[in-house]
Amino acid sequence: MTKEIIYRFESAYRGEFDIKAYHFNKGEKSCCIVGALRGNEIQQLYVCSKLIKALSELEKQCKISYGHRITVIPCVNPFSLNTGKRFWSSDNRDINRDFPGVSGGEPTQRIADSLMKTVNGYQYGIQFASYYIDGDFIPHVRMMETGMENAGLANLFGLPYVVKRNPKPFDRNTLNYNWQMNGTSAFSVYTNATDEIDEKSAELAVSSVLRFLSRMGIIKRHCHGGYMSSILEESSLMSIHSSRGGIYRRVKNPGDETAKGEIMAEILDPYENTVLEQVKAPCGGIIFFAHKSPLVCESTVLYKLIKRLKS
Amino acid sequence: MLETVASFGLAVGEKAEIKKNRLLPKDGAEGKKRIAIVTGVHGDELEGQYVCYELIRRINSRLSELNGIVDVYPMLNPLGADAVTRRIPMFDLDMNRIFPGGENDSPWEYMAEKITEDIKGADLCIDIHSSDIFLREIPQVRILPEYKRKLLPTAKRLNCDFVWVGNSAAVKSSSLSYALNSTGTPCLVVEMGAGMRITKVYGEQLLDGIFAVMSDMGIWTGEVGEVSNPIISADGEVAVIHCGKSGIFIPAVEHWIGICEGDHIGDILNVYTGEKEEEIFSPAAGMVFTLREYPVVSAGSLIARILGGGR
């Protein structure tokens, strides 16, 4: 393993801002893995740290295939992680809305540019990402439908689901979108945590990446087969909204099955503890996403449901 | 007449509401033109507040001279304004990146949709912004190049110092102005002043322009003052200056003055060593229309934009 600082600047008060890359093996650029772009992506940082540990062991045992280079960039935004801010610590810009970056631009554009230059040219790109609204997912691989995506490859992670998203205008400035447009097969992996550590899903994420690397012949490692992934269009997920604001009591969790009419959550009056709304499943299915925060506004997406196919 | 454009219940005993004041002529509004004055998409942009107050006050004081509909939306992000934050609190969303709305993953996307629908069909919309806390701007109109032919004649009448025909973030896809222009409702974006401030003289200047435009449209029959001719410029004629070092920026020029190539713009100082980290000189001759307001800078922070200084 070699360490490289791919971007550095001296800050006014906090010393050096460094983005570190960990390189394993030498040879063609086979796979690059990127962790926390945002200051609340603690799980994403943690998963990358576990991968660095696992890949270090594999390298020592000569189990990274000859001629294949793997790079892990665990954290692109240490300043925001250390100040507890989700976006860039001074001006609140989101690095993941600044790709492909500008070399002589704003601080976050420079970071995006340096990252893009480092990660370009890899055959496969994996980002541990977080969603823009608060909540928990079933672990899955997400891909933008750019016309260059390969959902068949995404199956090889062995996670339960692969989700394809039709990119919106704001998606065009994300790492995943630009990575794909530059010719890398790019995947975003979502575990079911962001600002806290979920050990079980972190292990699942590490296993899925090692499984993918093994199946692509980049590492030599026996892996369990994982799941036969189901491929979903994001637009096919059924959104279930709250009709009242209040305290949210979650009954059903990501991965749970639900039958039509079953109670999924309750919205309570924040002053009187009475039930304002019982959120019921409009159809049978599997819960893909669940809102997390204990406070909820009216018209918030509480759940996204994979509808059960009628037999 | 105060109207609620959209609302939803917050978690604890409160509603988020977008309100507008519809000013109608005494002899009825049927068949008459409509102008929408919108501001406060970002909660820290307050320059439009004085404009809204004074516009309503002046019209009400001479209501007999009103010959059309004036819809005034003083604050599209009321929670942000109250919490002194640019984005939408709790959701951490940039409201000017979610238009035309309708995605419906958060209640604010629903609000964005309702706002867009409410403004659609107006004969003109003016969306007033005020930079952010980091930069000071002269009163300027921003329009996308593809709408230049349609919007420039009106933009020139707004009594701003400068019309920038370019791809700035305020007019690009996902913004309110793009959502309106792309569906046939002409929308001009005004940028002036700095975030968290009200510059009364800029407000007065813009008000003269709004009354002139309303007069041109036949919405205002009263007397209007002379408006100045703005400088028209495209992206290629604007020099953008970023600093290369972090520290404290002390300007050596005033805002909105003419400078020559090589003139001293300012210095980046190191407060620990007492040394200058960087001296910044203008790469071209022109007018300083954007100047850094917030002194703390990181490598890459925007320092100034020079009009007429394209390279």
Image (cartoon, coloured by chain):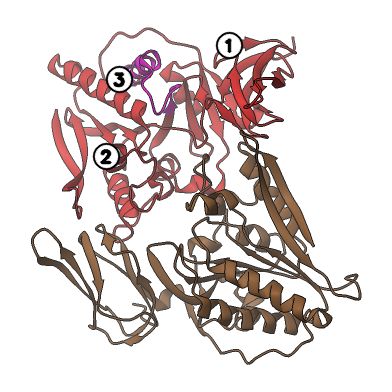
Which chain is disc 3 placed on? Answer: A
Where is mark 2, residue-wise? A78
In the rendered structure, which amino acid carries the disc numbered 1?
Answer: Asp
Q: Give the color of chain A as drawn.
A: red
Percent coordinates x, y for residue A136 in the rendering? 50, 23
- Of labels 3 and 1, the one closer to you: 1
Left or right? Give the position of A78 relative to B153.
left
Identify which residue is drawn at 82% across, 74% down: B68
Q: Is residue B259 magenta?
A: no
Chain for colour brown: B
Q: Are marks 3 and 1 on the same chain?
A: yes
Give the mark, 3 or 2, whose residue is nearer the N terminus: 2
The answer for how far apart the CA atoms under marks 1 and 2 are is: 35 Å
Percent coordinates x, y for residue B285 in the rendering? 32, 85
Above or below residue B266? Residue B183 is above
Dot 3: few (<14), some (14–19), or many (≥20) neighbours within 10 Å? some
Any mark on residue A217, and which? 3
The span picked out in magenta is A189-214
Secondary structure at badge 2 equals helix
Give the mark, 3 or 1, whose residue is nearer the N terminus: 3
The answer for how far apart the CA atoms under marks 3 and 2 are is: 32 Å
- Of labels 3 and 2, the one closer to you: 2
Above or below residue B43? Residue A215 is above
Residue closer to the observer: B232 or B211:
B211
Left or right? Give the position of B234 relative to B279.
right
Give the mark, 1 or 2, whose residue is nearer the N terminus: 2
